[in-house]
Image: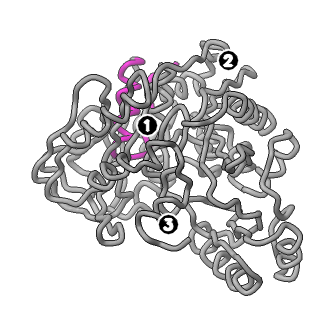
Amino acid sequence: MFQRILIANRGEIALRIIRACRELGIETVAVFSEADRGAHYLSLADEAYCIGPPPATDSYLAVNRIISAAEVGNVQAIHPGYGFLAENAEFAEMCRACNIEFIGPPHEAMAKLGDKVTARQIAQEAQVPVVPGSDGVITDPKEALRIAEEIGYPVLIKATAGGGGKGMRVARNEMALKSGLQAAALEAEKAFKNPGVYLEKYVERPRHIEVQIIADTHGNVVHLWERDCTMQRKHQKLIEEAPATNLPRKVREEICAAAVRLAKAAGYTNAGTVEFIVDRDFNFYFIEVNARIQVEHPVTEMITGVDLIQQQIRVAAGEPLPFKQKDITTHGHAIEIRINAEDPDHGFRGSPGTITKLRLPGGPGVRLDTHVYEGYTVPPYYDSMVGKLIIHRPTREQALACTRRALDEFVVDGIKTTIPLARRLLDLDAFIDGEIDTTYLEREILGHQH
């Protein structure tokens, strides 16, 4: 087992990893930018080093500075958390070249799965259903038009690199496809330094179901069942649940088995998430792999009792998984609400600033993953998420009641947050009945035509 780990991240996930390490008896080295100097969670690490000014490019994305901090801190491993460098195959390779273990998948598997076209090919070879589309990157607009005619409009133009909805366009006709190809490629080039795009059939009003997997270096791959992440805005998740509602048992088992096949085919180890869309007839299609721990991992932890961060660390240290597939059973229902420093009434614009009052919810079944406190100043430089409210109760009905109660108790003054919107969403009949899709929020609630 490792003696010391560096955490190449910030905020609530850095705190989550510090806590997991503390329980395993592992010392931690935290890194921080000038914007995060004085954050309370840093005092829980054994050491903390400043790695640069506020912009992420000069701090949390500065590979050389993070490697230097790891060498000065004399660590054996680096945990990247999520975001920043978590899915950067070159960073993973560089860590290992410096004899520092990267707590994540092998860089080869990460590179293969990070490219969506390659990931699609691996899925097809593993007999995992994929959405009909192009066999590779589209280089000729005429080829795009031919494929669109073949599979039928609407089609989805997707960047082969990255994620988060960037480099993505829906085209409902020939004209939209021609203009969308160029726009998506430009956006992809800007965001990921890779202009490659490909085409998929656009599945109307799907659900977003993802499967948590974990694999060790001894050939064992298990799934920890599925999560429903359908409540989204612009491909950003707002509410996550486990298990998924209204998913027939046979489909649930098939989608989880497909995720395991894909992980094995890609030579994957450590934690990862295989993402699918599910249509109204319960046909499911692979869309991508997130080769890292995810923001919504706590709902899986709550229903399975598995500490995913600790398992990531154990696997990276070469330990075999302590359980087999048959040991992974689920108990109750879990819901996660992302709390973002954003103003939903004004286009979800960021709301950095100082938290003047903070009243946190509690009681049975309530877990709160957050690094903020009264007097904390939310910086404008990073992702707007300031915390996650996670609820676990014996039934979905009880979990919904507990989530409503906890949100009613939750007070954050001084900044705008998404708490009022989340509270509103929990009362929607479509959400309660499990009848939403990934475009529901924009279409029905926010009034954006999709």
Whether residue 28 appears in this view of the structure is no
- Kind of residue sitting beneath label 3: Arg
How crowded is the residue under tag 1: few (<14 C-alpha within 10 Å), some, or many (20+)?
many
Name the residue: 80% across, 45% down: 129
Residue 42 placement (x, y as % from top left): 27, 39
Q: Which of 115 and 364 is in front in this view?
A: 364
Name the residue: 72% across, 21% down: 220
- Kind of residue sitting beneath label 2: Gln
The residue segment tinted magenta is 1-24
Of helix, strand and loop, which one carries label 2? helix
Q: Residue 23: within the magenta?
A: yes
Q: What number is the disc on residue 443?
A: 3
Residue 331 placement (x, y as % from top left): 49, 19
Q: Mark 1 points at which residue?
A: 6
Mark 3 vs mark 1, foreground winner is 3
Name the residue: 45% across, 40% down: 70
Of helix, strand and loop, which one carries label 3? helix
- Kind of residue sitting beneath label 1: Leu
Whether the residues at callouts 3 and 2 have beta carbons within 8 Å, the answer is no
How crowded is the residue under tag 3: few (<14 C-alpha within 10 Å), some, or many (20+)?
some
- Coloring scheme of the render? one colour
Q: Residue 168: within the magenta?
A: no
Name the residue: 14% across, 54% down: 413
Q: What number is the disc on residue 325?
A: 2
Identify the mark nearer the N-term, 3 or 1.
Answer: 1
Q: Quadrant of residue 138?
A: bottom right
Mark 3 vs mark 2, foreground winner is 3
Above or below, comparing residue 122 to residue 413 in the picture = above
